[in-house]
Structures are given as C-alpha cells and as structure tokens.
Amino acid sequence: MKLPDRVVVIGVGIIGASVGWNLSRRGADVLLIDAGLPGDGVTNWSFSWVNASNKTVRRSYFDLNVAGMAAYRELAAAIGSGSWWHPSGHLRWTFDPAAEAKSMKTAELLAGWGYRVELYAGAEVRRRFEPALTMPDDVRVLFYPDEAWVHGRQLVGRLVGQAVAFGAELRTGGAVRDIVTGADGSVRAVVLSDGTRLCVDTVVNAAGPSADRVAALVARHLPMRREPGIVTRLECPRAPVRRAMHAPHIEIRPDGDTSVVLHSREIDTHVDTGRDPAELAELLHASARHAVPELGGARIAQTRVSNRPIPGDGFPSVGGLPSVPGYYEAVSHSGITLGPVIGRLLAAEILTGESDEMLADFRPERLSP
C-alpha cells in the first residue's frame, strides 16, 4: 500500500470527518478544511436518525444503509460511545389509513429482507417505551429496535480530535478557492481563500450542499437537488422522549437530557414560500404538542433552514472520478447513517486503489454528462 503524499478533505461534517479519521489512523497525511466549525453545518441540523427502514427504494441502497448501521456499532466500540451514540430504536405510527397501509407494506418487505421490526398497540408503546406520548390505545405502532439517533456534532468533534491526534491537520474559517490540476488532469494543489497554495495529490469533496461548487473547480458538473429542510430545537427541563419517532405530521427525537429536535417533511414544503422560519418553527412545536403534550411548556431555542446534500438522482456519489486522478467524491443524503461506512470504504479506496463492490451503484461517473 502506497500512501498518498497528502489528502485534503474539503468539508468536515460527518462524512468528511469519517473519511479523515479512517485515513489518518492508517497513516495518511490528512488536511481537514472547513469554512465553518466541524460538524456545525448540515450534520448539526439534520434529524440524525440512523436507519435503513426508510431506504427501500433500491436494494443496493438499503444494503449500504444496513452496512452503515453496522459501522456505527463498530465505531462506538472503537472510539467509545459517550453521549453521541443512542441505539434506542425508532417508533413510527400514523392516523392516515393510506399512510398506515404503506408503512405496514414496507415493514413486511423489510422483515422479508431480515430487518428487525416489531408491531405494538399504542397502549403497549406507552407502557413499555414512551409514557409521555398521547395516542389511541389501539393504534398500530411499528418499532425498529436496531435503529438509533446520534448527536452529530459531538461525534464529529470526537473523530476530528482523534484524527488530529493521529497527525491530521485541521483548518477552519476558510474555503478552498481552487483545485489545480496538471497536464494529465490529475490533482496537483489546492488554493485556499486566503491565497495559500498547498501541494497535494488527493482531494476528497465532502462539502455537502456546496459539493457542486467544489466539483466545478475540477471542471466536473455534479448535479445536485435543491431540497431545503427546517429543523427546530426545543429546550425543556427534561426531555420527555427517549428515542427517535415519526408521529403524525412530525418527527421528534431527544437531543440530550434537556433538548428535543423537531422536523417535518410537511413543514419543509413551506420553506420556499417566503414564510418566516420562526412561524414554521411554531408549526413544528404545535404538531409536537399533539404527540407529546409535555412539550407544550418547552421553549423554541434554535431554528435553522439548510439545504440537504442530495446528488441529482437521489443516491450517494462516492469514489474517485476516472477523468480527474486524485479527485474523490463523498456526497450523500443520509450522511448521518452512511458517514462511518462511506468513511471506511472511501479511505480504503484511496489507500489501495480498489473500490468496494458495495459502492458499485454509487460511483461518481454515473452522474457525468
């Protein structure tokens, strides 16, 4: 195995931090670059739900997410679980008959694929799992025991801290302005926003929603979807729920002992209509109160709208681009679930030159014109 001279990872969210950690612990010379603070972008403003139950549109994508869940268990054993890792399962229920039928059909498919799913009545869910919930006694609730949520910013902080201990360098507060390529098209250097030029031979584009801008620096057109989402954090004396859940019209999860995170795909549809994010946060809070009345006394602490990093066809773009030797992409929605497994697989590809078959359907060249 020949180590690259230097690897620059652009973007230090969960995916970039995972790539950098995996490379640095295997002896690579790594530079992590982020215009902001590590883990403070989309990673900190996502629902942070580790799952494969919502990834059944393609079997290979489901399998990759299952591998992502396994990678988390391995990562927790390697770096310590601490307060970032919460493998407490996931609850899902709805009062809409058509949506319930769809959920039950998906659960049946998942069970056939060997994915663990359990079915409970509402009364039993309150008794066994979440006593603060309000729901009819006879409503059908799906429980996915192997799913989890993570505190993304804490995890990124731990990965970056260990990467730096292994010898990686971290630079924040500045962006990459240019990527210099040689006559053969291969990566030669990066130029930072302050004009600093660094000689490198490998660049990893893990820039999340800005990945298309970074790709353009090597004359690469990376199509990206625009799908903004709004996330609100509530502060409360005590978090009344203990696991991630999809309740009617609202997604809720704890975010520590005194904080709860709210998200809703329905509310996301209002982001581009010009409505004030503070008003949308109130709508999220109102929906949450219907599911968890105790949240009525909680205070809206923070709200942010951010763009999800979704390549044009909806699937990850992971691996090297043959037309630009030394340039790699690590861009994906579901970055929370996939971060650790993408980090491991892409680091191995950079170090060995061999791509894992698990990434075959998600190579960057499929998105080339």
Image (tube, rainbow, N blue to C red):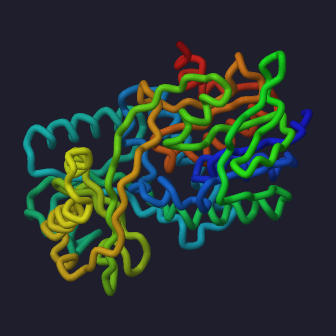
From the viewer's perspective, tell me whether residue 270 is left or right of residue 17: left
Is residue 133 toward the left or the right of residue 88 in the image? left
Q: Which residue occupies 78% across, 19% down?
A: 185
Q: Quadrant of residue 36?
A: bottom right
Across and down, in percent, residue 179 comes to 73, 34
The total number of labels drawn is 0
Residue depicted at x 31% and y 72%: 241
In the rendered image, which quarter contains the N terminus? top right
x then y, percent, for residue 230:
32, 55
Residue at image x 8%, y 63%? 136
Up-down relation of residue 112 to residue 10 (above or below): above
Closer to us: 131 or 241? 241
* Residue farthest toward the front in the current orientation of the protein: 195
Pick whichever, 87 or 247, lies toward us.
247
Where 362 sits versus 335, above or below?
above
Q: Nearer the viewer, residue 73 or 28?
A: 28
Q: Residue at x 67, y 22 (%)?
A: 321
The image shows residue 359, relative to residue 135, as above or below, that is above
Q: Nearer the viewer, residue 106 or 369?
A: 369
**What is the quadrant of residue 204 in the picture?**
top right
The residue at the far bottom in this view is 237
Inspect this view and state whether residue 223 appears.
Answer: yes
Q: Residue 223 in the image: x percent, y percent?
A: 48, 26
From the viewer's perspective, is 55 left or right of 73?
left
Q: Does residue 242 show up?
A: no
Residue 247 on image: x %, y %: 21, 57
Q: Relative to 48, does residue 190 appear above or below in the rendering?
A: above
